[in-house]
Image (cartoon, coloured by chain):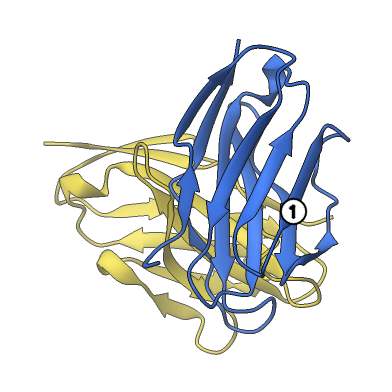
Chain colours: A yellow, B blue
Amino acid sequence: AQSVTQPDIHITVSEGASLELRCNYSYGATPYLFWYVQSPGQGLQLLLKYFSGDTLVQGIKGFEAEFKRSQSSFNLRKPSVHWSDAAEYFCAVGSVTDSWGKLQFGAGTQVVVTP
Amino acid sequence: GAGVSQSPSNKVTEKGKDVELRCDPISGHTALYWYRQSLGQGLEFLIYFQGNSAPDKSGLPSDRFSAERTGGSVSTLTIQRTQQEDSAVYLCASSLALSGANVLTFGAGSRLTVL
């Protein structure tokens, strides 16, 4: 069965510092991979996605992620965080053989940004 | 509409009552998804629709949960005889199609509290 692990439940980072959020997946076939962000009281907003091709994916708000098949990872990075990046971040995996919108989500990583 | 609209945004009900949650997807989006977000369980897939049919209902937690979609547009998630463990945020998402490089757009969710 497919699964998604986000090892860090909570991360605190200073404004202007770099950020990396980890995501590991377990999946038998080629996955579709996503990162979503959720601000308090809001729905999920797609940051970026990986379907195929270049393993370094650029997203919105200055985020990027790298797909590493050998490590079954899809880590999210941002070189310099802004206070507005404080939110919860979810990694998700979808199937190429199923409805890809039927996503398996990780438990999320809460990001706190300090001045 | 411009986005996925869900109503009500908040619902408080007594144990044993029935509730209906509504989702109005983006115009022209043929695929519609329901997810549940709760403490301890994270984000769980419930059901998806392609047009008015639901090829996959595997995520519905019990037979107290049902969903329908009419006219290929609005969807209603119904929970009968609500229990306290049904308390959660119910998220709806839509996309242009079930397969391919499509993006899920999520609504802000309906927060259900069962007393």
- Residue B86 visible? The answer is yes
The residue indicated by pointer 1 is B68
Q: Residue at x 55, y 89 (%)?
A: A53
Chain letter for mark 1: B
Q: Is residue B114 left or right of residue A36?
A: right
- Rendering coords of residue B66 (x, y %): 79, 43
Furthest toward the left, the residue is A115
* Circle 1: element type: strand
Question: On the rendered image, what quadrant is the C terminus of chain B found in?
Answer: top right
Q: Is residue B40 above or below residue B37?
A: above
- Rendering coords of residue A23 (x, y %): 55, 54
Q: Nearer the viewer, residue B71 or B35?
A: B71
Q: Is residue B109 above or below residue B103?
A: above
Q: Nearer the viewer, residue B102 or B3?
A: B3
Q: Residue at x 69, y 25 (%)?
A: B86
Q: Is residue A21 above or below residue A75?
A: above
Q: Is residue A43 left or right of residue B94?
A: left
Q: Is residue A29 above or below residue B105?
A: below
Q: Residue at x 64, y 55 (%)?
A: B75
- Rendering coords of residue B74 (x, y %): 60, 59
Furthest toward the bottom, the residue is A53
- Rendering coords of residue A99 (x, y %): 74, 71
Q: Name the amino acid type tagged 1.
A: Glu
Indicate the quadrant where residue A33 lies: bottom right
Indicate the quadrant where residue A73 lies: bottom right
- Residue A6 visible? The answer is no
Question: On the rendered image, what quadrant is the N terminus of chain B found in?
Answer: bottom left
